[in-house]
Amino acid sequence: MEFSTKDEYVDCIVEVLKIIKKNKGRICSSLKHCLNELLDPTYYDGKHNISKKAFEEAKTLGISDKIISMTWLQLGKYKSDKNISGNGRRAFILEHYYLRSYIRQELFELKNPNRNDVKKIITENLKTCIITAEEDLKLKELGYASKRPDPKKAYKEAGIELKHSW
């Protein structure tokens, strides 16, 4: 499924949400795909936030001026000298601040999905941060890999300081 505009992806989500009302279980992967595609620089309105630790590491690599605009694939080119469990040797992780499961739940709760309501949820919640593999591991150890009702609290508990506030 490929679209040429952000609105086409949003419209797809609207239609998917209508179908989900009838058959929720079979549609989640399409919604996940659309949310991931919206993070493509072609459609994504913002830049990624970054942890202070990841920014310092980016400075040592000479990429601090461009890292917040990099895609997941571009970030994967930078390797760490440490092999962090679950992340191989990736130096940087592109992390969803609000988990996709939270965004999906917000979308499912819409009584009558429409473009404006879907855009509002996406704009407010589809935020990403670049963190180090060590910071990602800390989030996992604290149980925040798949459940994160309060991202600000989770990041604080994990000792992750973001360079920019939202």
Image (spheres, rainbow, N blue to C red):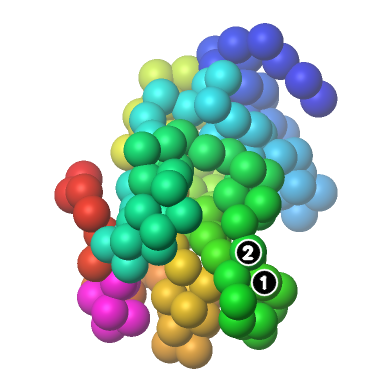
Tell me which numbered mark, 1 or 2, is placed earlier along the sequence. Answer: 2
Q: Nearer the viewer, residue 134 or 58?
A: 58
Q: Residue at x 40, y 59 (%)?
A: 60
Query: Quadrant of residue 47 in the image?
Result: top left
Q: Is residue 59 above or below residue 2?
A: below
Q: Residue at x 30, y 72 (%)?
A: 160
Dividing the picture into quarters, in which one does residue 85 lie?
A: bottom right
**In the depicted view, which residue is nearer to us: 14 or 29?**
29
The residue that disc 2 covers is: 79
Asked whether the viewer can see residue 31, the reply is: no
Is 152 a magenta residue? no
C-beta proximity under 8 Å, tags 1 and 2: yes
10 Å crowding of disc 1: few (<14), some (14-19), many (20+): some
Residue 110 at x, y percent in the picture: 46, 38
Q: Which residues are magenta?
A: 155-160
Is residue 63 at all visible to an observer of this figure? yes
Residue with the mark numbered 1 = 89
In the picture, which quadrant includes the N terminus? top right
Residue depicted at 71% across the width and 74% down the height = 88
Looking at the image, residue 138 lies above or below residue 130: below
Secondary-structure class at tag 2: strand
